[in-house]
Amino acid sequence: MRHEIVMPQMGESITTGTITKWHKQVGETIKLDEVLLEISTDKVESEIPSPFEGKVVELKASEGDTIDVGVLIAVIDDDVNASASAPAAAAPAASAPAAAPAASSAPAAGSDRMDIVMPQMGESITTGTITKWHKQPGDMVEIDEILLDISTDKVESEIPSPISGRLEEVLFAEGETIDVGVKIASIEMNTSIPFGGGASTASAPAASAPAAAPAAAVASTPVAAAEPTGRRFYTPLVKALAAKHGVALSELANLKGSGAAGRVNKDDFMNYLGNRGTAPVASAPAASAPKPASASSAPSAANIAAATSGRVEIIPMDNMRKAIARNMIASKMTSPHVNSIDQVDMTRLVKFRDSFKNEFKKQEGFSLTYTHFILYALVQALKEFPLVNASIDGDNIIVKKDINLGCAVAVPGNGLVVPVIKGADNLNITGIARALDALVNKARAKKLSMDDLSGGTYTFTNNGSFGIMAATPVILQPQLGIFCVGTIKKAPVVTDDLAIAIRDIMYATHTYDHRLIDGELGSKFLKHVINTLETMDPSSLF
């Protein structure tokens, strides 16, 4: 029996996923719960286990491809003797927009067009108003370039294009209000902006049916993919590899792909690179002089490298890094950040931990850290100052009755994730420690779910593990504060009786949103945390 594997939905607001790695190839056998592939979204990277045991008979997408939720990506046959088949040419276009009304885009059936639909801007949002089109029919658009502005009764947002290509049609004018999931535009996907050898004729905005004809012709004649037509589609991964290895546009256009409709995948590119040698490559497009890029088109990585003096390396951002960049900019533009900083005398806790850590590890199976004490102290302060555990919605203050602590975790090679300890106000210090250990292990194993990453009301980050004395972090929206600590160092301190003593000192920073939290409240919150850490009897907490 054949089982279809579709792109899973990694969270309520996630509409696409990028395949970063296939752990199995066509013809290989796979066991139940064995890792089949890795998927990246703008919030999380995850290993996806196989829900079936059998043989991989089809892979419908390549590494680097970004696929809509619910679209077929692979087929597994539980008969290990089943014959493997080549990927279907039209596989990425298998889903229609109606199958996923919350998605912002979906491939148009039987063509190389992608339909853009009105995205859902929140769980309770059912419509959106188009306030501005940044592109008009016939214009080129790059992936992540702003396509339009949308306004709802709660938020105004710039909507980026999910793909590179040519805007083929716009179905609604500025000022119109459209239901979520309704098609508002379409983009011709196989017009490659960074690697196109020439401009193609713009499609008529309303002629969506005739536009499918040339796309079907391309799909039905993959042999022509080896000819540089100026209209080939390349995945972001292939574009990045070409830029990194200095493969020119004309050279890439001559590459014959083994993917659907002759698409070039990572293996095609790397095999070509290995056999490239020093022999010149046919450069058919060289006859036509390159045309200047339009003002709205961003330069490709290859062009950036060529225009930069000196020795450089262009490294494309992965999805997680792009998401972090967007979120940090948005936070700085939303919240006026204020930082209150003071030192904490951790001597009492250092002595207690040194005497108790072995017993704790024997009992719990993981190490007792200073973070556990700090999180406990933060919970006490958030109970005392509930306005810090709040968010702002327009002119309203939303005070959260539950304390859900986000804890920043550095994942090697994958940036930063912030899993959330739910209901931290209902946990003792051992419960907090257990919850944190479980989340850290899931983060490092790439097993975090969207539920693990959502719902935070306040965040903690520890820069001390990197040997840093102090830092001023960025607030994670829509929260109003974040607490940061540095490393613990021995330092001379003047005691109350005017003596000099060597103490274990740590610096703590409370960063807060000045729209709601003034200096008095922000400083009182910091002092409450410090007082708890310096005066608590740690032995009574276990």
Image (spheres, rainbow, N blue to C red):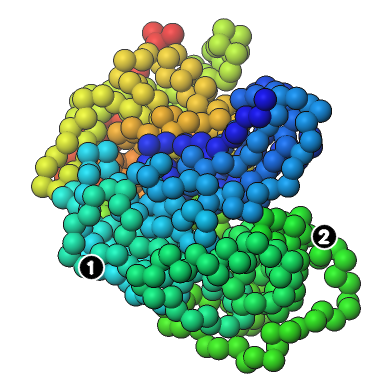
Instruction: Give the residue displayed 31% in from the left and 60% down from the top.
Output: 184
Q: Is residue 458 left or right of residue 275?
A: left
Viewer-closest of 339 and 346: 339
- Residue for point 29% across, 69% down: 133
Q: Secondary structure at mark 2?
A: helix
Q: Is residue 362 visible?
A: yes
Badge 1: few (under 14), some or many (20 or more) residues near its Cα, within 10 Å?
few
Asked whether residue 158 is in view, the answer is: no
Amino acid type indicated by mark 2:
Asn
Quadrant housing the N terminus: top right
User: Mark 1 belongs to which amino acid?
Assistant: Ala
Residue 144 position by quadrant:
bottom left
Q: On the picture, is 294 further left or further right than 284?
A: left
- Say which of 530 and 104 sits in front: 104
Return the residue nearer the eye: 401 or 277: 277
Real-space Cα separation, disc 1 to disc 2, in angstroms? 47 Å
Horizontal side of 156 relative to 159 (left or right) equals left
Residue occupied by mark 2: 271
**Residue at position x 52%, y 60% in the image:** 111
Q: Which residue is nearer to you in this view: 12 or 243?
A: 12
Which residue is the site of mark 1? 173
In the image, which disc is placed on residue 163?
none
SS state under label 1: loop
Q: Indicate the quadrant where residue 72 lies.
A: top right
Tell me the quarter of the image containing the C terminus: top left
Residue 182, image x, y percentages: 30, 52
Q: Image check: 438 left or right of 271?
A: left
Q: Measuring from the top left, give residue 267's x and y in whole percent.
A: 76, 55
Query: Closer to us: mark 1 or mark 2?
Result: 1
Residue name at image x 53 percent, y 51 percent = 93
Residue 74 is drawn in which quadrant? Answer: top right
